[in-house]
Image (cartoon, helix red, strand yellow):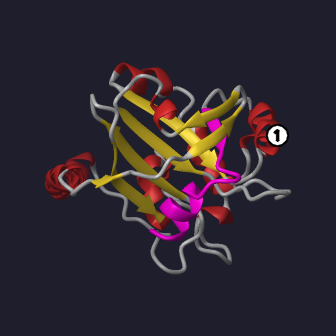
Amino acid sequence: MQHPVVPRSDWLTARERLLVREKTLTRARDALAEEQRSLPWMRIDKDYVFEGTDGPVSLGGLFQGRDQLFIKNFMLSPGQQHQCVGCSLEVDHMAGLLEHLAGNGVSYAVVAPAPIAEIEIIRNRMNWKVNWVSSYGNDFTRDFVLDLAPPNVDGSGNNVFYKDEAGNIFHTYASYGRGGEDFLGIYRILDLMPKGRNENGPNHNLTDWVKLRTEY
C-alpha cells in the first residue's frame, strides 16, 4: 500500500481533520452504549444448574455475591478436539481485567456445553484463572446462544445478566457474531497498524491470523 509522505505541518493538518471524525464516532459510541443499557429486561424463570470444578452451581451462584454478570459462551462441544481460537482470544483478554470488573460489581464466567473434565484440560493448559463452568445437561447454551443468535451465527456469544436484591435474575443484553469484536481490544491496536487486521486469507476473519497464544 502506497502512502503520501508529507512534511510535519501537513501531517498535523490531516491528523486534526481525522480527529474531528473520531470525536464524532466517540460520541455516537457513547449514545449507543446508553441505548444498549436501556434495552428491556427478560426475567429468568428457568433454573440453570452448571457443573463447576467444585460441583453444581446455579446461574445465581455465578454472580459470586455481586449483582452483575457477564457470561462468555465458549464454542466447545462434548468431545471437541480443537478449541476455538476466537473464543480463546477473547478469554485471553480477560486475564488482567477480572479484579477490575469485580471491583465494579461485575462477575465474569465462561460457559461451554462440554463436560467439566474436558473444560478443565483446556483451562489448565491455557493457565486461565477465569470461572469456567459446563452447561452439559442443561439448556443454557441452547436458550441463550442457539435460539437467540441471528441465523448463520456460530455458537459463540456474550450475555449480560442482573440480579436484584430479591434474587430475581434478568437477561439484559446479548451479543453474537462480530458483536464479539467489542470485547477484543487487540482489534483497536491492529486497526491502527499500517497493515490493519491482516485478515486477507480464505476466511476474511480472525481465523486468518490468530493462533492459540501457546502456539506462536
The verdict on residue 180 being magenta is: no
- Percent coordinates x, y for residue 124 in the rendering: 78, 31
Which residue occupies 33% across, 24% down? 104
Is 187 or 89 nearer to us in this picture?
A: 89
Which residue occupies 85% across, 57% down? 79
Q: Is residue 180 left or right of residue 67?
A: right
Is 46 or 100 nearer to us in this picture?
A: 46
Q: Which quarter of the figure is the C terminus placed in?
A: top right
- Callout 1 amino acid: Ala
Residue 12 seen in render? yes
Which residue occupies 57% across, 64% down? 142
- Percent coordinates x, y for residue 73 in the rendering: 56, 52
Number of numbered tags placed on the structure image: 1
Residue 188 seen in render? no
| Mark 1 lies on residue | 117
Q: Is residue 119 left or right of residue 11?
A: right
Q: Is residue 212 left or right of residue 121?
A: left
Q: Is residue 27 above or below residue 127?
A: below
Magenta residues, start to end: 131-148
Which residue occupies 51% across, 63% down? 143
